[in-house]
Amino acid sequence: MFKQHAAKAVISTLIALLMCTGSSVAFAADDKTWYQIEIIIAQRTEATTHLENFDAQQAVAEWPTGRRLSNFDPQNGNRNLLENTEFIDLPNDQKILNAQAKKLSTTGEIQVLNHQSWRQVLDADKRINWIDIKGGYAWGGQQQLEGSLGFSKGRYLHVHSNIHLNQFPSITSGSKLTKQRIFSAGQSLVPVIETRYSLIQRRKMRSNELHYLDHPKLILLVKIIPFTPAEPIIESDLEPTTVLVDLTKTAPAE
């Protein structure tokens, strides 16, 4: 009899352990966290790179297809959407790296090509979420800065950079005034890429920390912070009650 009770106790314990294990696995699989991601991509000017030695890549560049961020109108847009909608390029007043972008721009040796911030959910399944990256000027179907950035989450956060800086020989030389005249005149110039600089890296990250990916020609700043979205507004399911009042009836005397 004692053996039967002991066996039942062991079986009950095993079932409880399996249930706990199953719950843990289910929780891990459903580990979804909102983040605000912000990036700054800048290029070093010629004055700061003439002493650097690095490979200039002219081969055809390929990168994973990324999701494009939606534009937001800060004047007429619905700001409630910013609180619980993914992949919207946030207005400047909700960005967290404005001071860093301003500091880079005022050095005179660095040109900011892209400064974007958005919110999204990252699953703990190590799947890479790629974001389309464009920056600088566009010319003849080519972009000065192009590529994609990927973000994934496992035990740590990771950023995957696959971005490329194109330089066109017809407009990299000459003064700014000359370039403006070329564009304003609408001249049809073949966008031959003379030099391409690529930043292809994978970096393990921690949330709430500013990470810096360096390159002789490119600068990439990334910050990822946890974000708590606003609770969606739930409308009541109750039908409004209509009260009819007969105005022809005389009010009872008090």
Image (cartoon, rainbow, N blue to C red):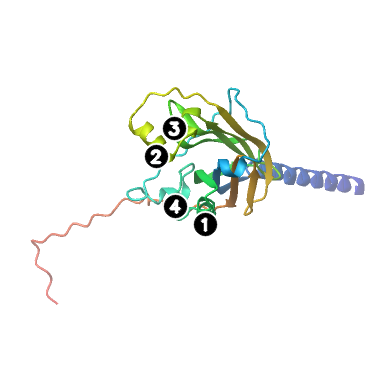
Question: Is residue 126 visible in the rendered structure shown here?
Answer: no
Q: Badge 4, how many Cα within 10 Å: few under 14, some, many 20+? A: few
Q: Amino acid at mark 4?
A: Asn
Question: What is the three-letter code of the residue carrying label 2?
Answer: Leu
Which residue is identified by label 4? 92
* 12 displayed left or right of 41: right
The residue sitting at 41% across, 41% down in the picture is: 71
Instruction: Tell me the element at label 3.
Output: strand
Labels 2, 1: front one: 2
Contact, mark 3 vs mark 1 (Cβ under 8 Å): no
Q: Whole-percent x and y of residue 38?
A: 54, 48
Which residue is depicted at the point 73% across and 46% down?
20
Discs 1/4, front: 1
**Going from the N terminus, do you reach mark 2 or mark 1 first?**
1
Residue 138 numbered tag: 3
Residue under label 2:
177
Mark 2 or mark 3: which is in front?
2
Residue at which label 1 appears = 99
Q: Residue furthest front?
A: 174
Question: Could you tell which of marks 2 and 3 lies nearer the N-terminus?
Answer: 3
Q: In what element is the residue under mark 4?
A: helix
User: Residue 214 appears at what percent x and percent y?
Assistant: 65, 43
